[in-house]
Image: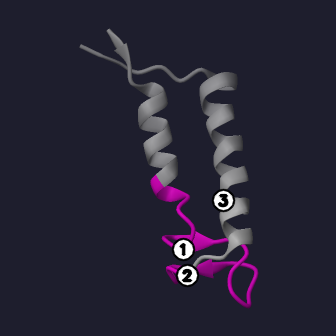
Amino acid sequence: MADWGPVLIAVILFVLLSPGLLFQLPGNGRAVGCANMQTSGISILVHTIIFFGLITIFLIAIGVHIYIG
């Protein structure tokens, strides 16, 4: 039986935290930009740090496991 928890959590967080898709921290000219599909280097760095923090919490601290089959 394969553990699909890390795969599903990583894919969902990757889609939700793509800079410019839903929101962007920091936005262009504002603190938060919404659905503008424009990215900057600092925005990519901030979203990478948020992704790393959340994936660490979900996979290591909480220990999410999803077994299929």
- Relative horizontal placement of residue 45, taking residue 7 as reference (left or right): right
Quadrant position of residue 3: top left
Q: Distance between the residues labelled 3 and 1?
A: 10 Å
Residue 17 shown in magenta:
yes
Can you give x and y, in whole percent of width and height, for residue 34 in the image? 56, 80
Locate the N terminus and report the quarter of the image it occupies: top left
Residue 39 shown in magenta:
no
- Relative horizontal placement of residue 42, taking residue 19 as reference (left or right): right
**Circle number at residue 38:** 2
Q: What residue type is labelled 1?
A: Gly
Q: Look at the numbered disc 1 and give the secondary structure of its residue.
A: loop
Question: What residue sits 35% from the left and 14% below the top?
Answer: 2
Q: Which amino acid does label 3 sit on?
A: His
Query: Does the CB distance between marks 3 and 1 fall below 8 Å?
Result: no
Mark 3 surroundings: few (<14), some (14-19) or many (≥20) residues within 10 A: some
Question: What residue sits 57% from the left and 68% below the top?
Answer: 19
Main secondary structure type of the part rendered in magenta? loop
Query: Does the CB distance between marks 2 and 1 fall below 8 Å?
Result: yes
Locate the C terminus and report the quarter of the image it occupies: top left
- Residue 23 vs residue 40, the one in the foreground: 40
- Residue that sits furthest to the left in the current view: 69
Q: How far apart are marks 3 and 2 (CA)?
A: 13 Å
Comes first in the chain, label 2 or label 1: 1
Q: What residue type is labelled 2?
A: Gln
Q: What stretch is highlighted in magenta?
A: 15-38
Q: Look at the numbered disc 2 and give the secondary structure of its residue.
A: loop
The residue at which mark 1 appears reads as: 20
Q: How many marks?
A: 3
Can you give x and y, in whole percent of width and height, for residue 56 in the image? 67, 33
The residue at which mark 3 appears reads as: 47
